[in-house]
Structures are given as structure tokens and as C-alpha cells.
Image (cartoon, helix red, strand yellow):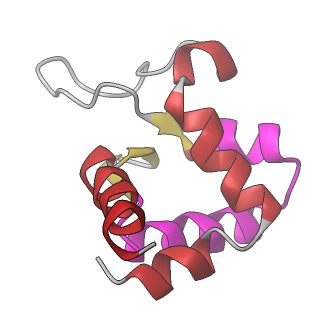
Amino acid sequence: MEPIDVFKALSNETRLNILKWLKHPEDNFPKQGAHIPKGVEFVGGVCVGDIKEKANVSQSTVSSYLNMMQKAGLLESYRYGQWTYYRRNEKTIDDIRNYFKLEF
């Protein structure tokens, strides 16, 4: 985790909102997992299309945002067929919390 990459990823209101929404996906998105095969555990994953719809941005914009957030370590993804699901990477988020505790 590079703090500067995390801060850049969160410097946009929509990206920050996506991270907030994914904290409680069951409250912010319709039921997920319809396309994930049985036996695959990806709890909390939300389909890109649902994130796009809630964020009210284009497909290319949401894909760019999600990619940036994943590269910063904030998100994890799972791809199955044509569907990609994202969820928060709680380890990185905890690392950021600890970074602030230690550095500031």
C-alpha cells in the first residue's frame, strides 16, 4: 500500500462514495451474486453494472474509477464470465487507519 496512491484514489467524490457504499453493500445495492458460481466465496462483492447505476456515471468512467481504486489496494475484484464484482479490501483500509494513527 502506497498512501499517496490511496489518497489520489479517494480525492474524487464519486470514488469516495463507492468506497462508502461498499462498506454496507447489502444496504446500498440490490441482492448480488446471481452470476457467481456456487462454491465461490466473494462475500460483499457488487457487480460493476450496479455500481455504475448508483454512481450515475458512464461504464468507462466507473471502470476507470474501480481500476484506480483496485491498483491503490482499496478494492478486490472477482471476474466470472462477463461479470466483474468488487468489494472493499479491508486490510488496506485498516493499514490506512494505522498509517494515520502513526504518522499524524
The residue range painted magenta reads 49-74
Q: Indicate the position of residue 22 as horizontal and vertical percent values.
A: 54, 36
At x 75% / y 70%, what residue is drawn? 61
**In the displayed structure, does residue 1 sit left or right of residue 65?**
left
Where, by quadrant of the figure, is residue 57 drawn?
A: bottom right
Residue 99 visible to an observer of this rendering: yes
At x 54% / y 23%, what residue is drawn? 24
At x 65% / y 47%, what residue is drawn? 18
Residue 30 visible to an observer of this rendering: no
**In the displayed structure, does residue 14 sit left or right of residue 95?**
right
Q: Indicate the position of residue 99 as horizontal and vertical percent values.
A: 34, 68
Q: Where 80 falls versus 16 (above or below)?
A: above
Where, by quadrant of the figure, is residue 80 drawn?
A: top left
At x 62% / y 40%, what residue is drawn? 20
Question: Magenta residues: mostly which secondary structure?
Answer: helix
> Is 26 or 63 nearer to us in this picture?
26
Where, by quadrant of the figure, is residue 35 drawn?
A: top left
Q: Indicate the position of residue 56 as horizontal and vertical percent values.
A: 88, 48
> Is 37 or 3 nearer to us in this picture?
3
Q: Where 55 falls versus 22 (above or below)?
A: below
